Amino acid sequence: MVQLRKVHGSENHFFLLDQTTLDQQLNDAELTALAQQITNPQTGILDGADGVLVVNSSSHENVLGQMRVINADGSEASMCGNGLRTVSRYLAEKNHANQFKVETLTADLQVSRQNDLAPEVPAFSVEISPVRFKPADFPFTNLGNDALIDQPVPALAPGLNFTAIAVPNPHLISFVDEATMNSDVLGELGARLNGVNDYFPDGVNVSFAQILGKNQLFVRTYERGVGFTNACGTGMSATSLAFAMVHPNLGEFDHTITVYNPGGLVKTQVHQADDRYWIDLTGNATETHLIDVDEAELHNANVTTETASIQQTTEEAAYLQFVDQLPKVSAIAVKK
């Protein structure tokens, strides 16, 4: 038998699979099929998820493991900040370490255990980098040849300004008022830019942000390969950087920024040294269920309530108690 974990960061839910525990690792086609099956609320378990976090061994120096992120539609994401926190917790407990690096698709990133947010709400901080702005890094076309920083783009949404930041996942960000935040604009724009379109041929994560005060934001994201999620770690990180760049009187470099989201909150700090930017993302790393299943069912993409044994932890109740104490900062914020 093999043990999967159901995990989440800010209610951004995943199944975590440690391939180093398998007799035979899943190949890419099998990982795609498993992600599409297990994350689907109808064919999978536990109401599905936003993706599968795959833990592999790493040959890189001072790195405890590799993380791959397979989205619900079977595509692979270059990074996932919320997912990285949960992988960091898993590797920390497995290796009895509190500070180390994790290999991702584009970089080895520093992670560390932090003080619990509340009883039974463990927290980790993860580095979000590299940060890029060039059109080729997304890619985007028909929006000019320069970086897109706080510019109106009537072809996307009249009356809104947009900033494009890759961290390295591509993100398109707009600061909006509460009425726009709660309208259908984000869903319509996210769906359009992640279908066949003339601007982002590979799709893009789209975030709307509402400024709540000095170093305070509410962020909602339409994720590429997933759709609306309760939170997007790289989206909140990229939005925090855009906040400090576009609204420097409200969003400060090297200061803690509180970012609320529909699944709770995270803390970010944005940094710049010469031409390099990076973001520290801190938030919960919660394990909700332990799932025992025969390895053959993973290869067959057949993880169901009939083939798996599921044990619930007490951590989700603790996290929801923590969330209930947060201020209700938006009409759609902190939904469970």
Image (tube, helix red, strand yellow):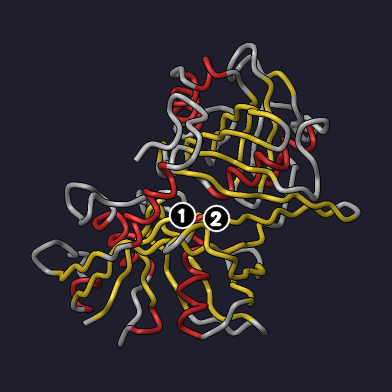
What distance separates the C-alpha of mark 1 from that of mark 2? Answer: 7 Å
Q: Secondary structure at mark 2?
A: strand
**For the residue carrying disc 2, how many other residues have a C-alpha within 10 Å: few (<14), some (14-19), or many (20+)?**
many
Residue at the left extreme of this rendering: 306
Above or below, 146 relative to 60: above
> Where residue 60 sits: x, y (%)?
64, 82
Q: Which residue is mark 1?
A: 9
Element at label 1: strand
Mark linked to residue 283: 2
Can residue 78 be spotted in the picture? no
Q: Where is residue 10 shown, x and y percent of the image?
A: 46, 49
The residue lying furthest to the right in this view is 274
Three-letter amino acid code at disc 2?
A: Gly
**Disc 1: CA contacts within 10 A as few (<14), some (14-19) or many (>=20):** many
| Amino acid residing under circle 1 | Gly
Which one is nearer the viewer's eye here, 334 or 243? 334
Instruction: Please give the label number shown on residue 269.
Output: none
